[in-house]
Image (spheres, rainbow, N blue to C red):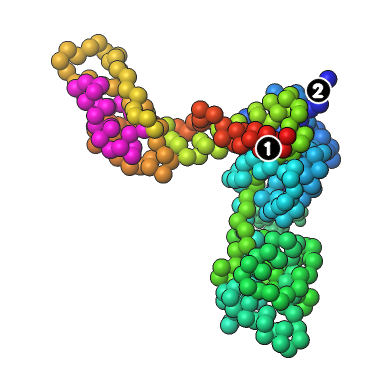
């Protein structure tokens, strides 16, 4: 019997929901018997076992090899797994749970707007025998950031939950915490310093190198999850456009489409004859079906270009997956496994 691949996923709340939604779209439906069960399955992948864990614990599980793959916040990975040799980041950006780790000061500190101002303040405070106190759940990232930005005199206050209240309650002067919309900071009368973004983060896919290295069956299960996730993510960049275009010949239609290079499709258009439902019209205009794949942000320019060729009834779809000649994320993982042999 080969061991199943152990995939650690968030066990609760907004993180769990967003992870399930992402995996479902990638064709990986997760089944959890009930919210109090901490083991689940993925339909169609019998050799994968899902472990439901706290987001922070997911990093520790992958670092110590008790999970082979995990999905969790990149902020937690950078804080708790930064220099762990067993940890490999497979896909850094899964496109959900975006947030920033920021340095924020009380709104009333009108003279302190940049990180350089904070450095000056920390020196001034030191002269008066005080130390700048920074409350955070991210001591490693915060310490590195402050030193790199010339803030040399400070103390870190370990805080858990409701960190934003620390300056008001008086047990810290400023905070380093996660922010998404900024509403929590504003509600607590705090302001992000200019240049005070310590890290931009989102959900990411991580792997344990040691446990994947020597077990081909696990690695193959990991490849399925990596390939499907990556190919699904790539679909966001592309749209598939289909249009009927009138023209003298397929070549003439192709020429028109190609004349605007950036909307000519990834490699160029696919052009097919349309056979009229009501018999052929000898010598009359001919119709062609044109299919192109364009970058999502060029959708409208491409539609306009096809309109200029006289086409109407243009349909646009998103592919379910976009696979490349190989999976860059999987190739990177293989190289990283090679290095730790
Ligand atoms: N407001 C937010 N918007 C988007 N992502 C966020 C936000 N806040 C935190 N995150 C991400 O979610 C992770 C925290 O996940 P989760 O909410 O499961 O844990 P928690 O906050 O420690 O637990 P709880 O919400 O029960 O206090 C963070 O490390 C970060 O990656
Ligand atoms: O900038 P905002 O949009 O206000 O979000 C920031 C808040 O979100 C997180 O808390 P929490 O873990 O409670 O949020 P969650 O419920 O989204 O996990 C974080 O610790 C902040 O307190
Ligand atoms: Mg939370």
- Residue 66's place in the image compared with 121, above or below, is above
Outermost left residue? 283
Q: Which residue is mark 2?
A: 2
Quadrant of the snapshot with the C terminus: top right
1 or 2: mark nearer the eye: 1
Residue 190 horizontal/vertical position (percent):
64, 72
Q: Are marks 1 and 2 in contact (CB under 8 Å)?
A: no
Is any atom of residue 76 visible in this view? no
Query: To which quarter of the image does residue 51 belong?
Result: top right
Q: How many other residues sit within 10 Å of disc 2, few (<14), some (14-19) or many (≥20)? A: few
Query: To which quarter of the image does residue 61 belong?
Result: top right
Residue at image point 81% right, 22% down: 2
Residue at image point 80% right, 39% down: 65
In this rendering, would 92 be left or right of 9? left
**Circle 1 — which element?**
helix
- Residue 255's place in the image compared with 76, above or below, is above
- Residue 318's place in the image compared with 147, above or below, is above
Is any atom of residue 39 visible in this view? yes
* Circle nearer the N terminus (1, 2): 2
In this rendering, would 286 be left or right of 338? left
Outermost top residue? 279
Q: How many other residues sit within 10 Å of disc 1, few (<14), some (14-19) or many (≥20)? A: few
Quadrant of the snapshot with the N terminus: top right
Q: Residue 176, which numbered label?
A: none
**Range drawn in magenta:** 243-265
Give the spatial CA distance, label 1 vs label 2.
24 Å
In this rendering, would 257 be left or right of 219? left
Q: Which residue is mark 1?
A: 339
Residue 119 horizontal/vertical position (percent):
63, 77
Residue 19 drawn in magenta: no
Q: Nearer the viewer, residue 337 or 21?
A: 337
């Amino acid at each position: 019997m080969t061991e199943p691949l152990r995939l650690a996923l968030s066990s609760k709340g907004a993180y769990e929901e967003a992870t399930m939604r992402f995996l479902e779209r990638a064709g990986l439906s997760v089944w959890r018997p009930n919210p109090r069960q901490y083991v689940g399955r993925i339909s169609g992948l019998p050799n994968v076992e899902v472990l439901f864990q706290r987001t922070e614990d997911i990093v520790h599980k992958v670092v110590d090899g008790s999970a082979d793959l995990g999905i969790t916040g990149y902020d937690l990975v950078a804080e708790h797994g930064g220099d762990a040799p067993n940890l490999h980041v497979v896909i850094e950006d899964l496109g959900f749970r975006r947030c920033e780790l920021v340095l924020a000061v009380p709104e009333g500190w009108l003279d302190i707007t940049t990180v350089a101002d904070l450095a000056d303040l920390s020196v001034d405070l030191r002269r008066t025998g005080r130390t700048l106190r920074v409350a955070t759940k991210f001591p490693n990232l915060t310490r590195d950031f402050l030193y790199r930005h010339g803030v040399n005199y400070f103390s870190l206050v370990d805080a858990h939950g409701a960190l934003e209240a620390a300056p008001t309650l008086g047990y810290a002067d400023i905070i380093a915490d996660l922010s998404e919309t900024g509403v929590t900071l504003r509600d607590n009368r705090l302001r992000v310093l200019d240049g005070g973004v310590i890290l931009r983060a989102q959900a990411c896919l991580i792997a344990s190198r040691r446990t994947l290295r020597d077990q081909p069956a696990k690695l193959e299960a990991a490849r399925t999850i990596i390939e499907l996730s990556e190919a699904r993510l790539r679909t966001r960049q592309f749209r598939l456009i289909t249009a009927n275009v009138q023209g003298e010949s397929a070549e003439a239609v192709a020429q028109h489409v190609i004349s605007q290079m950036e909307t000519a499709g990834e490699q160029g258009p696919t052009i097919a004859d349309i056979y009229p439902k009501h018999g052929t019209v000898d010598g009359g205009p001919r119709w062609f079906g044109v299919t192109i794949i364009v970058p999502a942000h060029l959708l409208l320019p491409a539609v306009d270009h096809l309109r200029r060729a006289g086409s109407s009834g243009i349909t646009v779809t998103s592919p379910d997956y976009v696979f490349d000649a190989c999976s860059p994320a999987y190739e990177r993982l293989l190289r990283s496994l090679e290095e730790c042999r």
